[in-house]
Amino acid sequence: MTSCKPHAPATERNRGPILDVLRVHFANRLRVLEIGSGSGEHAVHFAAAMPWLCWQCSDLVENLPGIDAWLDEAALPNLPAAVALDVAGRSWPVLGFDAVFSANTLHIMAWPDVEAMFAGLPAVLEDNATVVLYGPFNYAGSFTSASNAAFDQSLRQAAPHRGIRDFEAVAALAEAVGLRLAEDLPMPANNRCLVWRRGD
């Protein structure tokens, strides 16, 4: 099965800085839902480094075989098989999670799907849950770097519904479902880690 494993080079560059953030904010978490697990490489790296977490991968059904190829090879006890999740559909997991993680997904989704993702979170989040999102964001309607502007252009050329999202619009969606911003952390390559908490 290892021959069909997908590979996302960016995961090798960003997984270290992301893990530094997750070690702090997921230190007392138990069950994590990763939305849009992509290749599955992040999940393997983070689950191995944080064995106290049950790391639940999810993605569109067509991406599950590639994710499970990585998971099967890793054979980690805290890394169950990936589950299908279309944030705009009705396939959300029925289990409760005290953490959610998603990396480089919001600029790939259409905006209505971003809205649907936040709208779906309350049904799967426990009262004290932590949500961490990683990726590029605009602030006050402006790009934070020339490289992000070029990246946004390439995204929109590939698919018009894609694009770097405005922090303020994303924050409004989070606040509407009872999440409060705990940290907005700068990351390498002009990315951010946004950390929200539910409850007090």
Image (cartoon, rainbow, N blue to C red):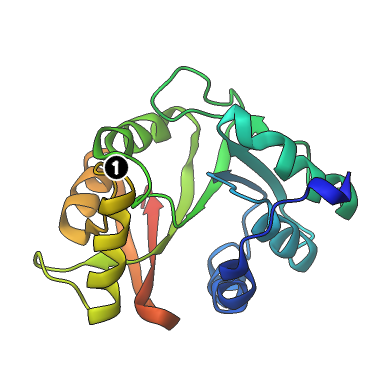
Left or right of 174, for residue 169: left
Query: Residue visible at 58% across and 43% down?
Result: 33
The residue most toward the top is 90
The crowd level at tag 1 (other Cα within 10 Å; few <14, some 14-19, many 20+) is some
Q: Is residue 150 depicted above or below 60 in this figure?
A: below
The residue pinned by badge 1 equals 178
Could you say where residue 82 lies in the image, as x and y percent from the top left? 70, 36
- Viewer-proximal residue, 125 or 139? 139
- Viewer-proximal residue, 117 or 196? 117
Could you say where residue 75 lies in the image, as x and y percent from the top left? 90, 50
Q: In which quarter of the image is the N terminus?
A: top right
Dot 1: element = loop
Query: Residue visible at 48% across and 37% down?
Result: 125
Could you say where residue 69 lies in the image, as x and y percent from the top left? 81, 44
In the rendered image, which quarter is residue 117 located in?
A: top left
Query: Residue visible at 26% across and 71% down?
Result: 150
Q: Is residue 132 depicted above or below 91 in this figure?
A: below
The residue most toward the left is 140
At label 1, the amino acid type is Gly
Q: Is residue 195 depicted above or below 66 in this figure?
A: below
